[in-house]
Amino acid sequence: MNQNLSITASLLGDPGRAAMLLRLMGGIALPAGELAVTANVAPQTASEHLAKLVEGRLLSVERQGRHRYYRLASVEVADAVEALLVLTAHPRTAELGSASSKAIVGSLEYARTCYGHLAGWLGVRISESLEKRGLIKEYGAKAYSLTASGREWFETIGVGVPSSSAIAQKKLARRCLDWTERRHHLAGTLGCAMYKRFRELRWVVPVRDSRVIRVSVEGRAQLWELLRVPLG
């Protein structure tokens, strides 16, 4: 076990490989060429890095024609990267514990994707509002439970809530510790479905070639109307 931990830590410790993992935190698959540019290394070096990450079960690879596309191997890998970011990131302000502290619009700290769900200042504010209104409740250290009124709320905006089987419930609404806000945002199946619906409604729009999320004028109005999230 000690050796396995050491091997995984060494994979994460290389700056080039770390850059690749961070680039893939958006939940998408990317070809080796794009990841080489991200890591600022030659294609051959990128291939060596990617082979090690696949062998270490941090990435999975899928071949399409002449190209290979890489993505994070699992949500647990994303969780590990996010946890390391929490340890290494510097707090934005001395008032980080204050709900009034707000990141700069258009930055990763303000709104970004975290393996398919919303993170950053916006993700945390939405989760806090859902909890304040009794739509979700804290359920242990790593999960939320969805209330009856919460199920109705999500279905009203067009988010289909998965079955209530024990296995589904474990993955339904996870609490993900945000590395910039140092608070939790909504992850899991429900968090991903909510982000997907917000995109369909054009309330949020991903910035090309980035994890940054932009909130539309309609999105600002709707998030205030539905959740009283103050976007200005």
Image (tube, helix red, strand yellow):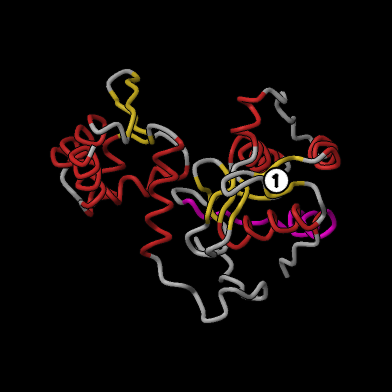
Q: Categorize mark 1 by other alpha carbons within 10 Å: few (<14), some (14-19), many (20+).
A: some
Q: Is residue 158 above or below residue 111?
A: above
Q: Residue at x 49, y 49 (%)?
A: 208
Locate residue 194 relative to residue 182 in the image: left or right: right
What x and y, as percent, mark residue 76?
A: 43, 38
Locate residue 9 relative to residue 75 in the image: left or right: left
Amino acid of disc 1? Arg
> Which image quadrant for residue 72?
top left
Mark 1 lies on residue = 202
Q: Is residue 98 above or below residue 127?
A: below
Q: Secondary structure at mark 1?
A: loop
Q: Observer-nearest residue: 228 or 104?
A: 228
Q: Quadrant of the N terminus?
A: top left
What x and y, as percent, mark residue 80?
A: 39, 46
> Which image quadrant for residue 161?
top right
What x and y, as percent, mark residue 202?
A: 70, 45
Say whether residue 177 is magenta: no
> Which image quadrant for residue 126?
bottom right
Q: Is residue 41 above or below residue 73?
A: below
Q: Residue at x 32, y 20 (%)?
A: 63
Locate residue 66 relative to residue 165 in the image: left or right: left
Q: Most prominent secondary structure in the magenta stretch?
A: helix
Say whether residue 224 is magenta: yes
Question: From which residue to which does the magenta span run?
Answer: 211-226
